[in-house]
Amino acid sequence: MSLRTIRHYEDTGLVMPSARSQGGFRLYTETDVARLMVIRRMKPLGFTLDEMRALLDATDRLDSGEELLPGEREELLKRIQGFEQAAQQRVENLRTQLARAEEFAATLAARLTSASAP
């Protein structure tokens, strides 16, 4: 992930450095890096910044250790489950696209082979 990308995610509020060095460099903890990895994994699946934020907010709330209101835990888990289902569907769509692309490439390779034969 490029520094520019990380700064973009910081500007949009998806991740914030835990601290800054005396020289002003951003310092990220393992938790911050884990957040960046979630974002990195969501991006190729086509999740929007708002969707990323919603998932991160839900996981942050669950992981906070704070007492949750009655039913809040179930609601957060339901939200995360929705993201898991959406991710599974998007992965399946990508598999279908990949299979079609591989079939197309094989068709072109076969055409080249047959056209090259004397």
Image: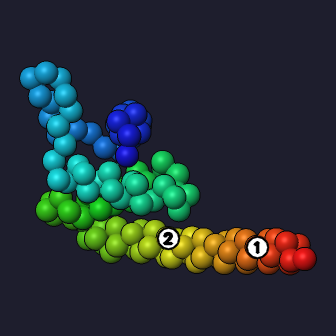
State the CA–CA distance, disc 1 to disc 2.
32 Å
Q: Residue at x 73, y 77 (%)?
A: 106
Q: Secondary structure at mark 1?
A: helix
Does residue 46 appear left or right of residue 97 in this picture? Answer: left
Instruction: Name which quarter of the figure residue 12 lies in.
Output: top left
Dot 1 corresponds to which residue? 109
Q: Nearer the viewer, mark 1 or mark 2?
A: 1
Q: Position of residue 58 (x, y in %)?
A: 33, 60
The disc label shown at residue 87, or none = 2
Q: Name the quadrant of the C terminus.
A: bottom right
Q: Residue at x 32, y 51 (%)?
A: 36
29 or 109: nearer the viewer: 109
Q: Position of residue 17 (x, y in %)?
A: 22, 38
Residue 30 sits above or below residue 21 on the image:
below
Q: Are marks 1 and 2 in contact (CB under 8 Å)?
A: no
Q: Residue furthest top?
A: 23
Does residue 23 appear left or right of residue 95 in this picture? Answer: left
Q: Residue furthest left?
A: 22
Q: Position of residue 16 (x, y in %)?
A: 26, 39
Residue 59 sits above or below residue 71 on the image:
above
Residue 19 sits above or below residue 43 on the image:
above
Q: Secondary structure at mark 2?
A: helix
Does residue 115 appear left or right of residue 8 in this picture? Answer: right
Q: Residue at x 60, y 71 (%)?
A: 94
Q: Amino acid at mark 2?
A: Ala
Q: Residue at x 46, y 68 (%)?
A: 83
In this orientation, does residue 47 appear? yes
Q: Amino acid at mark 1?
A: Ala
